[in-house]
Image (spheres, coloured by chain):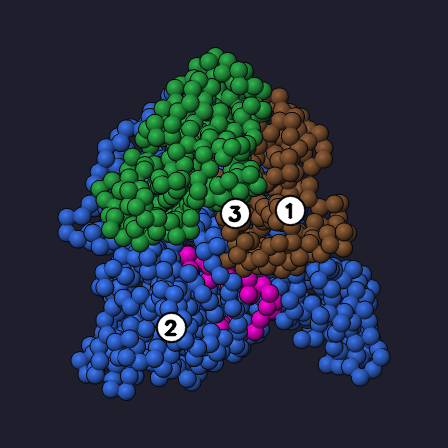
Chain colours: A brown, B blue, C green
Amino acid sequence: MASISMTVNGRTVSGEAEDRTLLVEFLRSNLALTGTHVGCDTSQCGACVVHVDGKAVKSCTMLAAQASGSSVTTIEGLANGDVLHPVQKAFHENHGLQCGFCTPGMIMAAVDMIERHGGDLDEATVRSELEGNICRCTGYHNIVKSILAAAAEIGGARQAAE
Amino acid sequence: MGVAEGIGARVARKEDRRFITGKGRYTDDMNVVGMKHAIFVRSPHAHARIKGIDKSEALAVEGVIDVLDGDQLAADGIGNLICGWMIHSRDGSPMKMGDWRPLAGDTVRYVGEAVVIVVAETKAIAREAAEKVVIDYEELDAVTDLVTAVEPGAPQIHPVAENNLVFDWTIGDETAVEEAISDAAHIVELEVSNNRLIPNAMEPRATLGHYDPGEDHYTCWTTSQNPHVARLVMSAFYNVAPENKLRVIAPDVGGGFGSKIFIYPEEIVCLWASKRTGVPVKWVADRTESFMTDAHGRDHLSTIKIALDANKKITAFKIDTLANLGAYMSLFSSSVPTYLYATLLSGQYDIPNIFANVRTVYTNTTPVDAYRGAGRPEASYLVERAMETAARQLDMDPAELRRINFVKTFPHETPVIMTYDAGDFEASLDVAMEAADYAGFPARKAEAEARGKLRGIGFNCYIEACGIAPSKAVGSLGAGVGLWESAEVRVNAVGTIEVLTGSHSHGQGHETTFAQLVAERLGVGLDSISIVHGDTDKVQMGMGTYGSRSGAVGMSAIAGALDKVEAKAKKVAAHLLEADESDIVIENGEVKVAGTDKKLAWHEVSLACYTAHNLPDGMEPGLKETSFYDPSNFTFPAGCYICEVEVDPDTGTTQIIQFVAADDFGNIINPMIVEGQVHGGVAQGIGQAMLEGCAYDPESGQLLTASYMDYAMPRAHDLPSFNVLTTTTPCPSNPLGIKGCGEAGAIGSPGALINAITDAIGNNDLSMPATPQNVWAALNAK
Amino acid sequence: MYATNYHRASSLSEAEQMLAAAEEGKLLSGGQTLIPTMKQRLAAPTDVVDLRHVAELKGISVSGGVVKIGAGTTHAEVAGSADIQSACPALAGLASHIGDPHVRHMGTIGGSIANNDPAADYPSAMLALNATIHTNKREIAADDFFVGMFETALGDDEIVTAVSFEAPDSAAYQKFPNPASRYAMAGVFVAKKGGTVRVGVTGAGSDGVYRASDMEQALSGSFSPDALDGVSVDPGGMLSDIHGTAEYRAHLVKVMAKRAVAAA
């Protein structure tokens, strides 16, 4: 058994888990953070994307023990209380989700994408950056639209702050 | 449009908040005290006899609760899985339904068939124990291909089905068709295969079965599109429990596309195992299990012969189809290649004579059933590939050939038992051609050619049938269930409203659109309206969501209940306001006497219904009404899709330059949600056309595309943004004028893609999926 | 996944000790291949030794035209490195298209070459760049390092610590991805240094990554796409599966090679 302690959504958590426990299993089972989903066995669908130390990773492809000592953000930690993150808001306003299953991973991937590219995102880049996130409902049309809208809003807010 | 959040408004979805904050509740998120975990031991062989099962080593693993097999299941009286739609062959004999046990009996017939369930403290322990179950198989020859399956000498899969033939069914007048063919000025012939697809809802199937011995009652949480049908079938046919002792809950469901209509072995077995073991049992599919065991879609091979007269008017279609049903008959498998397929073979065209012969076959593959579109994509693809081929052979503009043959007056009776009630096919063709700048295509093609690229453009004018009905008619065609829908509208004392619907939302946005209908009718805000679905303990019997039926049928039931609510509210208001009932109107959340300033707030009326202090004599208290709606006809969404592609001749890679969808869905409640349905449907159609192809090893019967490593799912960069447009002819067959929009995209797009690619490469002989390799091969085979 | 024991090494020597002490140990770098393989129960190490916290394996340096990349450097770090972008933009470009953004945040160059997946991108670059593979024991020329599919010259107790190569005059990588897995179905890395041209091919060959010597010869004479017109790729040496026949892969190798030369 591994003793695991990490910061999740700003809260220090610790627990015991088998060494083979995946980060996604630790989040879902030990911490009851069921917003992070598992949609495949081959590290391709991206439903499990969370941020570890500020970077998007697939929590199905990382042991919980590997993440021990790290800071993890999941979909549950993205909003600031009742105030949605601009990416969450954009997905809502642009109908960027249907069944909602891929959505947490999509949103976490989008936040990471926007952070890396700043306001400098176009449709082709967004589509290429979504390589690791599969959606079966939306045809991606409104996901792309949502991410571009959020990028514009975040970029605009940054500009205004500068 | 009378209300800001009413019919026609682009309202952002009410249900989004829980999904975007990680608070959705899917079946795998459900946990109950004492719950244990199941792993199914599945057949590694496509066809084998089971000579013995040794469970002793598995039972000895620490943490294992029990290991159960098919003999124990049968001994407890659990029944076989059934197909609920009876089809008779042309000789009058009934379809040949082979036995399908929830856990295999003495024979396994496809890779992935469930044989044993292991229940253990954790999933990891269950998996380890599952590896220790020793099953002695005697391998048998297998057949996976539908043509080989019906050849003499093919391995026989079910004793009941000679030559693996399930049924040999026909529709239409064969003699009249043969006469028309012999009189024809032109004959066009084409063979078309419709590739086998694996649905891949992003949420893998899952179930949690919980038997409560204190109440002798079962609860089943499951990934279902139709929990009431699941309960009915598990009760009436599988003998799991009587309906009043079985609660089925389909909570948030992560996509279905048809694959979650059917009742699968796992739900049945987990409920039974829960009673056997005394613990709640949860099973969640791995993706590879989903690939192997979710009902697959399509897998047809068809030939079509078109007869045309000298004026290029079509006089007959003759169609011959082989359809692969897989190893067993899934719940609605027989209806897909028959009444959901052959009845649409007239397309958008006025064709006096049609004859179709459909033969369905068993193979050693995963059962095949309805997948988004279910029969209609097969019909549309066949007809529209044939129309494009005919235009090419006759050297005509493909739009022009279609125009000559369009149905132009309604209602229109086809020779394949459909009555098209409304439509305007030229309108959608015109809208699509203009949006695609069809006139400018030759210049674009020339420009691409100058860059060494091949441009092509293709049409697909589809028609489909939704809201399968009326129940009496489908019953006469063999359906085992009625296809109505129910709704209950509960107005609470304070005026807030709950709508209980038999429809089930797994991405379609019912919590928003259904509330918009109520807002439109009563003028109350969306926040005070809740839509309740997916739980047989809460909602009266309903039929669920599939076949694009929830708008046309489900909302019509809600409209029916609202009629009754309004009628009662008006009676009460007339009584309280001392006015004539016929003068009462309901507007903007108020109940008014028309032409006066006399009015009551909506909640004052509802409160009056519940205090019952002052109701008209003889009136019952309360304000709650139920409606069961049985449509008078199918609905007929139709439209025109145009796709323009550019092929790289060096690699065979196809890039979609533009995709235009012009749909006629009748009246639309929420355009934003409808567009989303089209986007998703088109993406699945493009997936079928260019990427997705289920493959089996023909020798071993192993599924070669059992993960995303080998099954090509459409990703964002495979697709363009779509240009989605609508034209409107309201549907005359239901009170809201709705036709349905859930499947159109998947029905209308594959043909547009393949017509465009074959146009680009100048070779009409190209099968789906048009992967770069296949396109490159077709280019070089010219 | 079968049960395993997780160890976190904080230095190379600690990693060596942990690996030596394990019954059947495996090194865990980014884990983007090893963990999926363990999840599929196709690998069952008794112990995994996490290298992510070993400082000696980190970092990128360019000096005197020699590029050195620590084995623990992630694909995202290689792709985003201004030094690599300047010294060998083709390698930065290659790294920016491995897997997806999430995989690139975890996966490392050392892990990729040590695994030597026949469809991985990096091995083709290592061959074409005539790279040296540094381990805790020795230095190995790329030509000697990649032995066959999933096979390298590494010993059981050997740990890749870095790769190094002389910056090429020009180079480019072109990949044709498998439509399903998105791994290379044919990936060609072309590098020119002085009068020497080297061509590494991944994803296509039935023995894994290889050098296309006839292409190298043709391009050494004239570094232009047309120089490859006369070169034929033998389908006999190609992989063949449901995604691409040997003939198609052979064809793609040539198309990708020409495109790489054009882009270099």
Q: Which residue is mark 3?
A: A133
Q: Of the residues tagged 3 and 1, which is closer to the observer?
A: 1
Q: Which residue is mark 2?
A: B446
Residue flagged by tag 1: what amino acid is it? Answer: Glu
Measuring from the top left, give residue B738's x and y in whole percent. Answer: 54, 71
Q: Earlier in the sequence, mark 3 or mark 1?
A: 1
Q: Which residue is mark 1?
A: A115
Which range is magenta?
B662-688
- Chain containing the residue with disc 1: A
Residue flagged by tag 2: what amino acid is it? Answer: Ala
- SS at badge 1: helix
Residue B667, magenta (yes or no): yes
CB atoms of marks 3 and 1 within 8 Å: no
Most common secondary structure along the magenta stretch: helix
Label 1: how many residues lie within 10 Å, few (<14), some (14-19) or many (20+)?
Answer: some
Residue flagged by tag 3: what amino acid is it? Answer: Asn
Q: Is residue B146 left or right of residue B572?
A: left
- Which residue ends up furthest to the left in the rendered image? B152
Most foreground residue, B585 or B767: B767
